[in-house]
Image (spheres, rainbow, N blue to C red):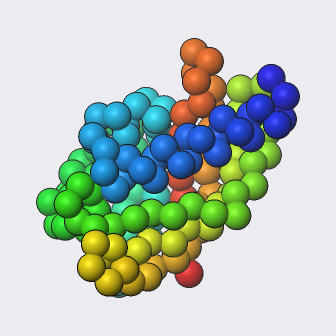
Amino acid sequence: MTDAATSIEIHSVLAHLAHLADDGEVSEYLENFAVDAVWETPENPRTSMPAQRRTGRAEIGEGVRARRADGIQGPGTGTRHVITTIAVRPTGPDSAESTAYWVFYVETTTAARLSSVGRYDDVFRRVDGRWQLAHRRITMG
């Protein structure tokens, strides 16, 4: 696979994850993560979300369900994750890293408002021909 093809496929995974975070099924969202994936985020004062480190699909899924239950994201919340300025770096035939900026909008059905911004530092692995997120480190600001 060429670096360009890897980049295109990972861009697509990043976009798909953002769409699913806002409107998709949790099970479909989790399919984009490696079985042993790690998801790390610092405290987010805007959403009152504490710092977290979740390992594995089950724990990551618990976090998604908690954010949805709290009305922070998910179907019906009027939120949008926007991913931009994506740089992908292949690190091997079945591994890659990416850095992307994100912006998070709330109240998009009434008067869209920017809530927070940050950066994703991600590690991807190709498993059975499919790119999956293996590690996400979220930075605020």
Decide if residue 29 is on the left or right side of residue 139: left
Closest to the observer: 10 or 54?
10
How many numbered dots are placed on residues in this image? 0
Instruction: Please identify the quarter of the rendering in which residue 139 is found.
Output: bottom right
Closest to the observer: 40 or 108?
108
Residue 54: x %, y % from top left: 37, 50
Q: Residue at x 33, y 73 (%)?
A: 108
Against 29, residue 116 (above or below) is: below
Residue 110: x %, y % from top left: 27, 79
Residue 41: x %, y % from top left: 45, 65
Q: Quadrant of the N terminus?
A: top right
Q: Residue at x 23, y 55 (%)?
A: 75
Residue furthest to the left in view is 69
Q: Residue at x 44, y 72 (%)?
A: 104
Q: Residue at x 64, y 45 (%)?
A: 11
Instruction: Please identify the quarter of the rendering in which residue 59 is found.
Output: top left
Closest to the observer: 27 or 54?
27
Decide if residue 1 is on the left or right side of residue 66: right
Residue furthest to the front in view is 110
Instruction: Please identify the quarter of the rendering in which residue 133 is found.
Output: top right
Against 52, residue 62 (above or below) is: above
Is residue 89 visible from the viewing direction of this image?
Answer: yes
Is residue 59 visible from the viewing direction of this image?
Answer: no
Q: Quadrant of the C terminus?
A: bottom right
